[in-house]
Image (spheres, rainbow, N blue to C red):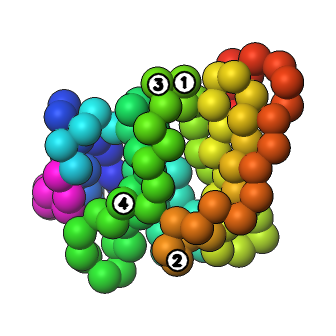
């Protein structure tokens, strides 16, 4: 399983029988508020409370790549749009919803709900 330590470190922890392995996968230098796997478990979204979203591909064991930076203190959350794992959606507390293309972080669409959002 994956978890985040203080300061934005993504850690993989694998337990098998009486053995365990712990590996630092990425360090994004921002506290991670949420981790979400894509429906096919090939991409992990790392979401910070500062409004930055990173992607991490466990099979490639590479670095976390910054996908988008909302630059908003009102950033609430992000999640995958299903089916598939090509798009994600983010929302701010003020109700702005944005759809993003995961390959390059292009904002494809945005609209305002005109209500305050508390949970996604």
Q: Residues within 10 Å of mark 2 (few under 14, many from 20)?
A: few
User: Crowdedness of circle 4 by 10 Å Cα count: few (<14), some, many (20+)?
Assistant: some
Residue under numbered circle 4: 66
Query: Could you tell which of marks 2 and 4 lies nearer the N-terminus?
Result: 4
Verify CB contact (< 8 Å) between mark 2 and mark 1. no
Q: Secondary structure at mark 2?
A: loop
Q: Earlier in the sequence, mark 4 or mark 1?
A: 4
Q: Which residue is mark 3?
A: 73
Answer with the quarter of the image where residue 34 lies.
Answer: top left
Q: Are marks 2 and 4 in contact (CB under 8 Å)?
A: no
Mark 3 secondary-structure assignment: loop
Label 4 or label 3, whichever comes before in sequence order: 4
Q: Label 1 belongs to which residue?
A: 74
Q: Which residues are magenta?
A: 20-27
Residue nearest the observer in this picture, 24 or 32: 32
Q: Is residue 23 left or right of residue 83?
A: left
Q: Is residue 3 magenta?
A: no
Residue 83 position by quadrant: bottom right
* Earlier sequence position, callout 2 versus callout 1: 1
Which marked residue is nearer to the observer: mark 2 or mark 3? 3
Circles 1 and 3: CB atoms closer than 8 Å? yes
- Residue at 50% in and 74% down: 104
Spatial CA distance of label 4 from label 3 is 17 Å
| Residue 25 belongs to magenta span | yes
* Dot 1 alpha-carbon crowd within 10 angstroms: few under 14, some 14 to 19, many 20 or more: some
Which residue is tagged 2? 103
Real-space CA distance between mark 4 and mark 1, rounded to the nearest whole angstrom: 19 Å
């Amino acid at each position: 399983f994956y978890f985040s330590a203080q300061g934005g470190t993504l850690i993989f922890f694998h337990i098998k029988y009486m053995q365990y392995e712990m590996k630092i996968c990425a360090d994004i230098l921002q506290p991670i508020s949420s981790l979400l796997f894509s429906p096919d478990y090939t991409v992990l979204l790392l979401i910070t409370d500062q409004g930055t979203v990173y992607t991490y591909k466990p099979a490639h064991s590479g670095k976390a790549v910054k996908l988008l930076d909302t630059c908003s203190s009102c950033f609430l959350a992000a999640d995958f749009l299903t089916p598939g794992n090509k798009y994600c959606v983010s929302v701010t507390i003020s109700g702005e919803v944005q759809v993003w293309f995961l390959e390059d972080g292009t904002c494809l669409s945005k609209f305002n709900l005109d209500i305050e959002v508390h949970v996604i």
